[in-house]
Image (tube, rainbow, N blue to C red):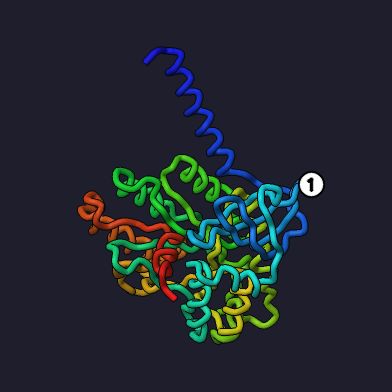
């Protein structure tokens, strides 16, 4: 290969990596008029569902979701053919997509006081979708989870996918930990799907479950949902269409209130600290906020026990979005 061509290719590679870093860390620092806004947006060949609208430094932006893949993105309206709709009209328009099927399934499972929502995906595959909750905590991030994942999976699955349920309060209290996670993602060591976990994550040691967490009387769900999304965007994070109820506690009315924002509640069938063992396709729950060393230790043991299968690509981590998409693709 001649030197000019080699230099050109290196320059393209460097610019590409810089562009990725800029895209990955786009921060919207001056968000105004952030609100739910629903509709259809088309940019050939893809249809998107619009979820939110906001302004930043004089420009208007949409938060969009691909209803087939559940991938979200921020973009300007000018690139799309747009038709505003009510949430009911938009859900009906996209009713045959995996995204809307997942929303309907979570509504059907909304009666349970604990763990309503999607609990598993890809049941035929050997592996799990890992979710780690970042509830408000005075302790630092438990970084072992992320360094061990990278160590085990770097040869077979890079970046390794993980879904993090983040609260507004945790982001405010732990800017250095958040920056460290973003750097891991920028270096392609892990890929993070960011789950809304409410802003305040209030909890009472005395109140019964039916009046606890987000069921506490006087809770402002609009604030808990939208302020967390705004905090994500200001910190350079991309909100997903997933939401995890604090304490996994909700009732039917709360679930329907959530799905009216276009968000899918994510539960778990394997909370490791409670001794629940993951099965094929499990959505595993651990806490990465330093408050649950038992669950983290159990996960690290699980990684080590599956090391041989991981090396042979027989036991993998799955992207939560792909897990849910594949679970609902082709279903009614």
Say which quadrant the C terminus sits in: bottom left
Single out the residue that lies furthest toward the top: 3
Q: Residue at x 55, y 63 (%)?
A: 241
- Nearer to the camera, 164 or 172: 164
In the rendered image, is residue 138 in sight?
no
When the figure is inspected, residue 90 is found, relative to residue 302, above or below; the finding is: below
Whether residue 84 sits left or right of residue 179 in the image: it is right
The count of marks equals: 1
The percent position of residue 29, horizontal first and vertical second, equals 71, 48
Q: Residue at x 56, y 35 (%)?
A: 19
Q: Which residue is mark 1?
A: 58
Q: Residue at x 30, y 46 (%)?
A: 156
Kindly indicate the quadrant of the structure image that contains residue 126.
Answer: bottom left
The percent position of residue 21, horizontal first and vertical second, equals 54, 38
Say which quadrant the N terminus sits in: top left
In the rendered image, is residue 76 in sight?
yes
When the figure is inspected, residue 207 is found, relative to residue 324, above or below; the finding is: below
Single out the residue that lies furthest toward the front: 45
The percent position of residue 237, horizontal first and vertical second, equals 58, 51
- Nearer to the camera, 19 or 307: 19
For numbered disc 1, what is the local secondary structure?
loop
Q: Residue at x 37, y 58 (%)?
A: 318
The percent position of residue 78, horizontal first and vertical second, equals 71, 48
Q: Are there few (<14), some (14-19), or many (20+) residues within 10 Å of tag 1?
A: few
Kindly indicate the quadrant of the structure image that contains residue 211.
Answer: bottom right
When the figure is inspected, residue 130 is found, relative to residue 6, above or below; the finding is: below
């Amino acid at each position: 290969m001649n030197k000019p061509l080699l230099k050109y290719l290196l320059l393209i590679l460097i610019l590409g990596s810089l562009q990725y870093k800029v895209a990955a860390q786009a921060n919207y620092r001056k968000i105004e008029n952030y609100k739910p806004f629903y509709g259809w947006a088309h940019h050939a060949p893809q249809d998107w569902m619009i979820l939110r609208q906001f302004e930043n430094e004089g420009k208007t932006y949409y938060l969009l979701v691909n209803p087939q893949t559940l991938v979200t993105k921020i973009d300007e309206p000018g690139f799309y053919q747009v038709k505003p709709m009510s949430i009911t009209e938009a859900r009906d328009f996209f009713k045959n997509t995996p995204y809307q099927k997942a929303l309907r399934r979570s509504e059907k499972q909304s009666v349970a006081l604990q763990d309503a929502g999607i609990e598993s995906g890809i049941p035929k595959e050997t592996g799990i979708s890992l979710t780690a909750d970042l509830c408000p905590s005075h302790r630092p991030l438990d970084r072992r989870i992320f360094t061990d994942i990278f160590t085990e999976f770097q040869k077979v699955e890079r970046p390794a996918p993980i879904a993090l349920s983040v609260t507004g309060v945790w982001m405010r209290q732990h800017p250095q930990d958040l920056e460290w996670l973003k750097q891991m993602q920028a270096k392609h060591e892990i890929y993070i799907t960011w789950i809304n976990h409410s802003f305040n994550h209030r909890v009472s040691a005395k109140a019964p479950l039916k009046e606890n967490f987000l069921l506490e009387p006087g809770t402002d769900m609009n604030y808990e949902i939208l302020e967390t999304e705004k905090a994500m965007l200001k910190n350079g994070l991309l909100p997903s269409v997933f939401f995890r109820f604090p304490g996994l506690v909700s009732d039917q009315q709360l679930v329907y209130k959530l799905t009216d924002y276009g968000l899918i509640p994510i539960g778990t069938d394997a909370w490791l600290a409670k001794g629940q063992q993951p099965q094929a396709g499990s959505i595993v729950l651990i806490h990465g906020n330093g408050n649950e060393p038992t669950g983290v230790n159990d996960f690290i043991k699980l990684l080590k026990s599956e090391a041989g299968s991981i090396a042979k690509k027989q036991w993998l981590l799955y992207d939560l979005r792909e897990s849910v998409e594949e679970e609902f693709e082709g279903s009614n």
